[in-house]
Structure formats: structure tokens, C-alpha cells
Amino acid sequence: MTNEQYFVKKGDIKISISAIGYIEPENYVDVGGEVNGRLLKLLVDQGDFVEKDSLIALIDPSLAEDQVREAKATLDYLKATLSERIHKQKLARTEMLRNKRLYHKGIISEIDYLRIETSSKVADSQLNSINAQIKQAIASLSQAETNLDRTKIYAPISGVVLNILIRAGQIINTNSNTPILMRIANLENMIVRVQISEADINKINTNMIAQFTLLGYPDKIFSGKIFNIIPYPNVNNNVVSYDALFKVDNKDYFLKPNMTAQVVIVVKKAQNVNIIPINAIKRIPNKSKKAIVVLYDKKNDTYTYKQIEVGIQSREYIEVVSGLTCEDIICAKWRTLE
């Protein structure tokens, strides 16, 4: 046997896509201030782990406390005024009913009765007005108390403080863009966002397994299952790609946000099949699954052409679906017979 001969053998063959991805937390929250004021104190630092509902920051409560006091004073004043208005309304209604009887008996004039009736209607209107003001004052007090509560900022989730964007002493202004104080992320479950080229995007689907390594850790292999393929494209310098997402367990916190992942996705594979070198075949035009190889007859020491059916191929090998067995010998590289 010469170096150009190849024994057909059993093996595994797979087609894979290589791409670059970036790691991000599956669940994170940007924590912001909901009331205006000066940030009085930060109770956590970058990298700290915080429990859900734990106190993480304080806004100066002075303004909110003043608003609560003013709202309470307004409500107390209106409630006191309400008692007076109720008393006046009762007197005016009693007077109106008494004079209505006198008017029907002809004892008082119509003008006098209408004057008294108008006074009763004014008293009713004033009572309705004060009730409406009290309702508004109660709402204002409730809002002021809510704002006071919001000067204490609590962690919305358990997780790690990734970054802090504002420091104690700075002013929080809710009228500007959302005032973000910090980002808290649950790092126990991460997502790899991998960019797939437009040439490869239709080769993948959800539930496919993706494997990746990290820069600096080439021997540590991670894996996850694709759960989402974003249909909206990324366009960068006229190059189109699409994001595919898969989840990775990270209970040991080894993976960090924004790490670069070198991703491999096996899109098709065949196991324990007959394989031969890709250079050993010549494709038959217009027949994508048909090819020709040069078969070696060891007994007669001769070479002949043999048509075969092929399947999937990698960079080096191609699957033989039919036409060859493991007992056959072929030329490892296609050649034309004389």
C-alpha cells in the first residue's frame, strides 16, 4: 500500500459553526431613585452580595419629611373646616325648610324665600368643596408618605452589585433621565449572546447544544442549550449577524459579565459511519449527493472509478452513505485514471 491509499473506516463526523459570544447575567436590575434629593449614604459597595429587600441606600429625607408635615397640616385644617361647614349647612337647610313652609302659607315673599334657598345651596356647595379638598389632601398625604418611604432604597433582587453610578452627596433628579444608582445581578445563571452570521443563521435552531471556552481557559469547556434566536439583525460595517442566546449554570460564579466566549455549535452530526477524506471524491454535477472515488483492487492491483452516495462533510472528511464498505481501499486524493 502506498501513501496515497486510504482504508475506508468507521468514524464520527460533524458540522459545526464557530462564533464569538459575550456573557451577561440572565437576571439583573438597574436600581434607581424614585424621589428627588441628595444621596445621603450608600450601604453597599461594588462587588458586594446583597439579599433581596435589604437596605442598600439612603436619600436625605428632609424634603420628604417637610412634605409630609405640610400635607398633615393641610388635612388637619380641612377637617376642622369640615366640622364648621357641616354645622353651617345644617343650619342653612333647616332655615330653608322652615321658610319654604312660610312661603307656601304666604307669610313671606318669594324674594325672601329665594334668598334663603340660595344661601342653603351655597352652604351645600361649600360642603361639597371641602369634602373634595379633603379627598385631595388625603391623596397628597399618602403620596408624601410614599415619597418618604422611597428615601430608603431596598435591593429588588438578591445578587451582586456590579457597578455603582452615583456617590453619596450627589443629587438625584427624577425629572432627568432615569437616575440609576447601581446595577444588581444574579450571577448564578448566565446567558451567552452569540453573534451568528447571516450565512449560518438558518443552520441553527432552538434546543441545539452550544459549547464554548473562555480566553485564558481553553481547556475548560462550558455548554448550554439555545433557547432564543433574535430575528432582528445586527448590522456593523455592512456585515449582518443575528443573536442566538443560551443559558449556562454558574453556581460557582466562575463566569463574569462581558467575558468573551469562543462558541462552537454542532449543527449536524453522524456517528459510527463510513468516512473518507474529502479530497478523495469528485462531485457529479447537478447531483449533490453523488460522487466518484478511485477504488483500489488489491487482488488485481488495479484502480477503477466507483460512484458513491455521500452525506454530511466536515473540513477533512465526508460521510459515505452507500457504495463503499470498511473493506474497501481508495485513493486518498482524487486522481484521473489513464
Image (spheres, rainbow, N blue to C red):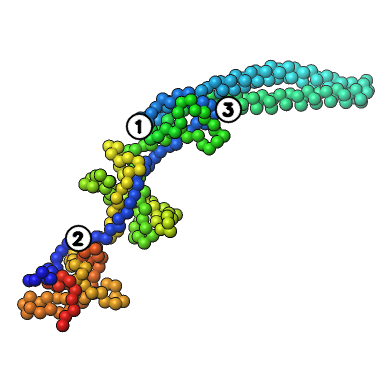
Q: Give x and y (percent) for residue 201.
A: 37, 58
Q: Which residue is mark 1?
A: 47
Q: Are marks 3 and 2 in contact (CB under 8 Å)?
A: no
Identity, as a three-letter code, of the amino acid under mark 2: Asp
Q: Residue furthest left?
A: 299
Say which of 97 and 79 sits in front. 79
Q: Position of residue 108 (x, y in %)?
A: 92, 21
Q: Secondary structure at mark 2?
A: strand
Question: Going from the N terminus, do you reach mark 1 or mark 3 first?
Answer: 1
Label pair 1/3, CB-CB below 8 angstroms: no
Neighbour class for label 2 at 10 Å: few (<14), some, many (≥20)? Answer: some
The residue located at (25%, 65%) in the rendering is 313
Mark nearer the N terminus (2 vs 1): 2
Q: Earlier in the sequence, mark 3 or mark 2?
A: 2
In screen coordinates, is 197 left or right of 134? Answer: left
Tell which of 199 and 169 is nearer to you: 169
Q: In the displayed orientation, state which residue is furthest to the front.
A: 237
Residue 149 shows in this picture: no
Q: Quadrant of the N terminus?
A: bottom left
Tell me whether the residue at label 2 lies in contact with that at label 1, contact meaning CB atoms closer than 8 angstroms. Answer: no
Residue depth check, mark 1 versus mark 3: number of the one nearer the observer: 1
- Of marks 2 and 1, the one in the foreground: 1
Residue 311 in the figure: left or right of residue 231: left
Counting from the top left corner in percent of width and height, residue 173 is at: 54, 31
Q: Residue 12: which disc?
A: 2
**Label 3 sits on residue:** 143
